[in-house]
Amino acid sequence: MAGNDWINSYLEAILDVGPGIDDAKSSLLLRERGNFSPTRYFVEEVITGFDETDLHRSWVRAAATRGPKERNTRLENMCWRIWNLARTKKKLEVEEAQRKANRRLEHERGRREATADMSEDLSEGEKGDLVGDGSAHGDRISGRMPRINSVDIMENLANQLKEKKFYIVLISLHGLIRGESMELGRDSDTGGQVKYVVELARALGTMPGVYRVDLLTRQVSAPDVDWTYAEPTEMLSPRTTENSMQELGESSGAYIIRIPFGPKDKYIPKEMIWPHIPEFVDCALSHIRQMSKVLGEQIGGGEPVWPVAIHGHYADAGDSAALLSGALNVPMLFTGHSLGRDKLEQLLKQGRQSREEINTTYKIMRRIEAEELCLDASEVVITSTRQEIEEQWRLYDGFDPILERKLRARIRRGVSCHGRFMPRMVVIPPGMEFHHIVPHDGDMDGDVERNEENSTSPDPPIWSEIMRFFSNPRKPMILALARPDPKKNLTTLVKAFGECRPLRELANLTLIMGNRDSIDEMSGANASVLLSILKLIDKYDLYGQVAYPKHHKQYEVPDIYRLAAKTKGVFINPAFIEPFGLTLIEAAAYGLPIVATKNGGPVDIHRVLDNGLLVDPHDQQSIADALLKLVSDKHLWARCRQNGLKNIHLFSWPEHCKTYLSRIVMCKPRQPRWQSTDVGFENLETNSPGDSLRDIQDLSLNLKFSLDCEKSEGTGTGALDNSFDIDDSVDRKSNLEKADLKSKGAIGSLMEKAGQHFGGGRFPAMRMRKYIFVIAVDCDSVSDIPKVIRTIMDAPGKENPIGFILSTSLSISEVHSILISGSISPLDFDAFICNSGGDVYYPSLSSEEGLGLPFTVDSDYQSHIEYRWGGEGLRKTLVRWATSVNDKNGQTVEEDESRSTTHCYAFRVKDAELIPPVKELRKLMRVQALRCHVIYCQNGTTLNVIPVLASRAQALRYLYIRWGLELSNVVTFVGECGDTDYEGLLGGVHKTVILKGIGNNALKLHSNRSYPLEHVLPFNSPNIVQAKGCCNEDVRASLQNIGVIKE
């Protein structure tokens, strides 16, 4: 009940404090002897031991209850609630301790195995002959930029950037984002992260070498939010132009780009965004592709200008950035802001919710999996503090600081990492704007702001609101700015102030604890802290010495800092743990020395600014001594003040952006490698009815060349170059290979080769289809696939020009056998996505050399998904894993070399019940720093391991980028369930038809997931329909429902 929320809050506070509950003396045992007195227990163990006002209020209510029996019953129930909560919390703590121990053992075991693999060639590698694996780790062995550790290097970097014209994409999905009048604190999703990403985009937009910055977020058109959040584009005007040195262009600068995805006309919390991320990725991909073309016309000489990096903020945006990075083959950066595993541990410690309840409420496991994917995909992970790396990121399977250091050492020596990778963790504190802050250089004994304002100007209203609390307002002010949260440790600060008489005589204390109208309307924990502070003020008789105003505006915060500086005061942050400590930087900018907790980010800030003292937040005396030392020693106060003002520029946005850009420059450049292949096809009509791979005459018309082309094959580049006006940047060697048509001797082969290299013929036909049907049905039996294919191909009728793509976990040879068994021609398809997305093929009129089948492999796709592929090192680890499974359960898993390809390692599984769930195998690979995508296929009878950013869904996005396949014209057919990559097939801008009754046997593969499918699948999307069955009539009816064919 809502009226009983205070009970949970104070019980939780009691358990967090610690003493009392575990030392229950003998009161609980008395119940067994029949002598239990709930009244006595409650008074002794609760009221006396924990001086909580809410608790006392509940005691008064219980004591006022008429009738001793009813009163004792109420008290007894409350006592047993406390005891039960304590027992539950203890149980959860034991379970969590066991999980931590297991995680530590897994990391140690993975580290040992990885080290053993890498030590095999140590002596040989030390000679420097194995340089190829450096790029697999994300760093080039030769030509790497030196570590940035000096002003000279930073200046050289600035000079290099002057000649660049970078396009950078930032992503922050949740909350309400706009450039001005940000509604910070409006809800839990619109907080510090919103301000950070907006200011980062704004600052980057003014940096030399940066041409354009796009901050992608969600477009919100809900009636309960301001109309500005529905504007598709908003330009971020720079705060200052002093750093803007690049030539301005038509599309240059920083912009907020609002992408429409998710429920229309509804503002949703971040926990509800997960099912809609594929839709965002598809829409963002379209924006980036279009913008790259626009920028190419402006600054790229006609070639698309792809993003130099995609930077995700928070887990949801990180997940999106990973998919976009994979689809575009560009570097990814990630900033967590807050991390799921850390939050999970904090929630479990509270003891109020089980792991399952937490997952249901916060979708925490989906968030953690997204953060693991970010570790897999990111070149650089940016953190605010060293503490975030050492205490939070090390909780993840995909990051081990010890193994990371070993890998870095091997790279520096040019030693192979055997396909292993750890992202680079970089500490870059958030930037701040200081241009509006005027340093005060006047007499330290006088008015420090005498020259800032005219003497006739009135004092800011907040000054009088604070000073009315003080009997002597001229004393130095000790300022604390934090919400009344138990973690902020404000009660210890008040106790330290109250019990130190010299400090009380020298200084006043000001507590800015948010805004409140009534304590009764505050949340339980916050109200409890505030009431405790009020009681402490009364206990130590601090009236006239402590200020605690009820209200202040956000724009008044600088005035509060100025008031503290004017009185020669001190700023304090006594939190038990402070992840960063932005208020410490703000205070330093106004000339305030600091006293801060030694736990977390303040350590890094103090190391740079050297403007105060660090204390143990649990040591009340240490806090009092540090404050007294600063307010009593004028020379120390002045030195700390000057140090802060002198070094504060290191936390400015320009400094932040210089370090940021230096990390981007150090990333290995990656981008799509076929920029010039779309030349000559930009103006093709997308709805041309006659484009079909099954029509050779149409191919000839589209390609617009004849057998006369063969006459010029001896010229090197051939008539194909002249016909299509190919850009000189095209690889000449590749041109010669593609133009070598003599050995083929057929027009079909001629068209195939031209189409493969130049984006012509059959391949642009994909963009010219009215619709593309993607058959991604994971049937219960492979023998059912031909029937399903034929049903789907026949459903639209002959009058509808449809293209077809087969998307499957099968190898291309298995696909060929299936097509033959069903009397289906490969030429009926536009493309084949095989090996769960590990390979893409196109139909061919002749067998490709080495393949022996009528298909052509897309070698560009292979290089596109190469990123982080572990190669032979990964294969050896998988074979070792299979051996360990077989040692336990008999011959269960064996390598399937016949189905394996360069980018897919396949294994046969005899009994799916005897192998660990897919999440365990993913964990095993991540612990050993191997980045890959593990998929259980065909009801668990096969296992495919492919590159980390490859999948069937990603292959479709590749076809969009490569050939212009319009994703909104795609209809994907799936079963009711499927392989473990099933969830990736449903979301997005494409339409989906679920065939009822197919794929149900695969449900067992999803029974041991980290999170349920309903947390991530948009079943309520209008783009998803369910066919009643798999007959022609049912499929046709479904297509009519989504408007693909007419009734």
Image (cartoon, rainbow, N blue to C red):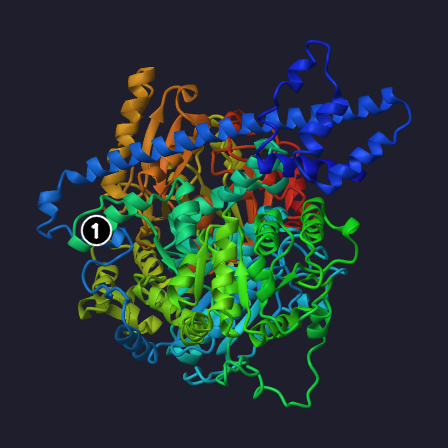
Q: Is residue 313 visible?
A: no
Instruction: Find residue 157 and report its horizontal and vertical position in percent.
Output: 30, 74
Name above or below for residue 710 compared with residue 983. below
SS at badge 1: helix
Residue at the image position 51 percent from the left and 55 percent from the top? 623
Query: Relative to residue 123, is residue 265 drawn left or right?
Result: right
Counting other residues with Cα less than 10 Å from the Cα at mark 1, is it few (<14), some (14-19), or many (20 or more)? Answer: few
- Residue sticking out furthest to the right: 66
Residue at the disc numbered 1: 409
Residue at the image position 68 percent from the left and 41 percent from the top? 1037
- Residue sticking out furthest to the top: 33
Residue at the image position 72 percent from the left and 74 percent from the top? 464
Name above or below for residue 758 compared with residue 458. above
Instruction: Find residue 15 and report its horizontal and vertical position in percent.
Output: 61, 34
Q: Quadrant of residue 30?
A: top right
Relative depth, front residue between 334 and 690: 334
Q: Quadrant of residue 648?
A: bottom left
Query: Relative to residue 600, is residue 732 drawn left or right?
Result: left
Instruction: Find residue 51 and report its horizontal and vertical position in percent.
Output: 68, 39
Q: Is residue 520 visible?
A: yes
Relative depth, front residue between 188 and 522: 522
- Three-letter residue code for mark 1: Ala
Query: Relative to residue 83, is residue 882 drawn left or right?
Result: left
Query: Relative to residue 849, is residue 52 drawn left or right?
Result: right
Instruction: Find residue 997 and report its horizontal and vertical position in percent.
Output: 60, 28
Relative depth, front residue between 563 and 951: 563
